[in-house]
Image (tube, rainbow, N blue to C red):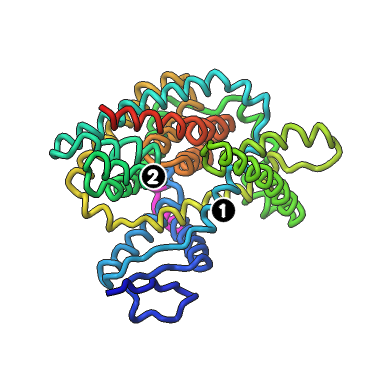
């Protein structure tokens, strides 16, 4: 029997005889907008979501993912989304982060960057140890623990998919890729829900506030992008100027990415785009001092916030929650262990090491995303916290560099080491 082709909602009219429902790119993006507004409505309605800085895309996205799971259970048809637009929005967001960066800020944060990298690599060892303990607890091969450790949590869905066949074929872990995908999905949920409460506990419990330097650095942006737009301070020309700068940086970043691939160096596409943004914002204003440049402008903040919000909405609504049920026993116990150990590590190691100040609390919220979810989740956690309590600009530069640039390289070595034990 040949396998039926999936349904492309809004593209392919043949719905009745197909085994799956594949939502096309246009509708996936449109649903992403709707999911964000659902989350915004939930946040406005429930004080608990506001009090614990749960991002709007998280509350809306989790509700949408649950609704999709119900549809799958009732119809017997799996649902998939075309996430091409989501992946483009991720590049937009991190390129905007790079455009806002100044070399002086990076130099100021150099020692913190090194310390954060050391803490993250050290935690990789801890995380894989917890994963292996969970695997052995349920009588699974120890290598299965890697798929419930850094291959899925710090690495995310992409790393889990990449290592899954190796773990299954070389070490006899049946369903290794599926276990990794389920772990990554569960980790994304945990990271989205824990970052805000951890930051609230640290900030309000210690009366922490942004430093004068952070307040001064954020001051040129004025109020939030939404407020400045409403006041008429952002025009379509400002937005177009920001988009042009983003596209120039992406063009340079993509060219660099292709050159790195040709040299055998694999990095997420958004990393060279982020670095290209830093390069442009630290050279163009010097070379063309009279030319308007959108770095740290309300228009660039508006584009950045939109890209992150829709990206995260699409990421969470597209989670295949039904994959969790098949691995329920070892998965839920091990993920509970991972969440508890990560929270303890953040509270008792990361927060003190980062300085026990407001910046450290924001980094702690982001570190939750790094260790359990993914870099965009980490940034969304920090964004929700800073919108409630005040700015911490350096955190948005340093953490993505650590989690996306250095950690992916280190993770490959750590995974290989633990698989060989």
In front of the other: 209 or 386: 386
State the SS at label 1: helix
**In the image, residue 414 above or below residue 369:** above
From the viewer's side, name the closer residue of 131 and 170.
170
Residue beneath disc 1? 88
Which quarter of the picture shows residue 263? top right
Q: Residue at x 62, y 40 (%)?
A: 259
Circle 2 residue: 162
Residue 285 included in the magenta stretch of the image: no
For the point 27% across and 33% down, the residue is 340
| Mark 1 crowd level (few <14, some 14–19, many ≥20, 10 Å Cα) | some
Residue 137 lies, in percent from the top left, at: 14, 35
Q: Which residues are magenta?
A: 41-49
Q: Which residue is located at x 37 percent, y 21 percent?
A: 349
Q: Position of residue 187 (x, y in %)?
A: 34, 43
Q: Is residue 395 above or below residue 58?
A: above
Q: Is residue 83 at least partly visible in the picture? A: yes
Question: Which mark identifies residue 379?
Answer: none
């Amino acid at each position: 029997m040949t396998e039926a082709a999936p349904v492309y909602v809004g593209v392919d009219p043949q719905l009745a005889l197909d085994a799956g429902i594949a939502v096309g790119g246009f509708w996936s993006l449109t649903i992403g907008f709707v999911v964000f507004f659902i989350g915004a409505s939930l946040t406005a309605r429930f004080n608990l979501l506001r009090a614990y800085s749960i991002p709007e895309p998280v509350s809306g996205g989790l509700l949408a993912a649950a609704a999709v799971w119900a549809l799958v259970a009732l119809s017997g048809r799996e649902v998939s989304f075309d996430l091409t637009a989501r992946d483009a929005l991720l590049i937009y967001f991190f390129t905007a982060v790079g455009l806002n960066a100044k070399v002086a800020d990076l130099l100021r944060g150099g020692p913190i960057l090194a310390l954060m990298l050391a803490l993250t690599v050290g935690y990789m060892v801890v995380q894989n140890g917890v994963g292996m303990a969970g695997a052995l607890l349920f009588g699974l091969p120890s290598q299965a623990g890697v798929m419930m450790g850094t291959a899925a949590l710090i690495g995310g869905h992409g790393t889990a998919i990449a290592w899954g066949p190796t773990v299954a074929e070389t070490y006899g872990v049946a369903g290794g890729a599926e276990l990794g995908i389920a772990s990554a999905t569960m980790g994304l949920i945990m990271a989205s829900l824990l970052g805000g409460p951890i930051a609230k506990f640290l900030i309000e419990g210690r009366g922490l506030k942004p430093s004068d330097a952070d307040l001064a650095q954020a001051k040129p942006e004025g109020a939030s992008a939404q407020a400045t737009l409403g006041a008429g301070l952002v025009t379509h020309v400002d937005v177009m100027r920001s988009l042009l700068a983003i596209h120039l940086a992406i063009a340079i970043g993509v060219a660099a990415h292709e050159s790195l691939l040709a040299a055998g160096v694999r990095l997420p596409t958004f990393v060279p785009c982020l670095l290209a943004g830093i390069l442009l914002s630290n050279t163009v204003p010097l070379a063309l001092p009279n030319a308007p440049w959108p770095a740290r402008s309300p228009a660039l903040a508006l584009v950045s916030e939109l890209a992150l919000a829709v990206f995260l909405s699409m990421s969470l609504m597209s989670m295949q929650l039904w994959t969790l049920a098949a691995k329920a026993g070892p998965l839920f116990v091990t993920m509970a262990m991972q969440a508890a150990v990560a929270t303890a590590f953040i509270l008792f190691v990361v927060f003190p090491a980062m300085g026990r100040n407001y910046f450290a609390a924001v980094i702690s919220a982001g570190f939750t995303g790094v260790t359990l979810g993914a870099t965009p989740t980490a940034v969304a956690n920090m964004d929700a916290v800073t919108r409630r309590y005040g700015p911490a600009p350096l955190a948005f530069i340093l953490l993505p560099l650590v989690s996306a640039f250095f950690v992916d390289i280190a993770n490959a070595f750590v995974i290989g080491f633990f698989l060989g034990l």
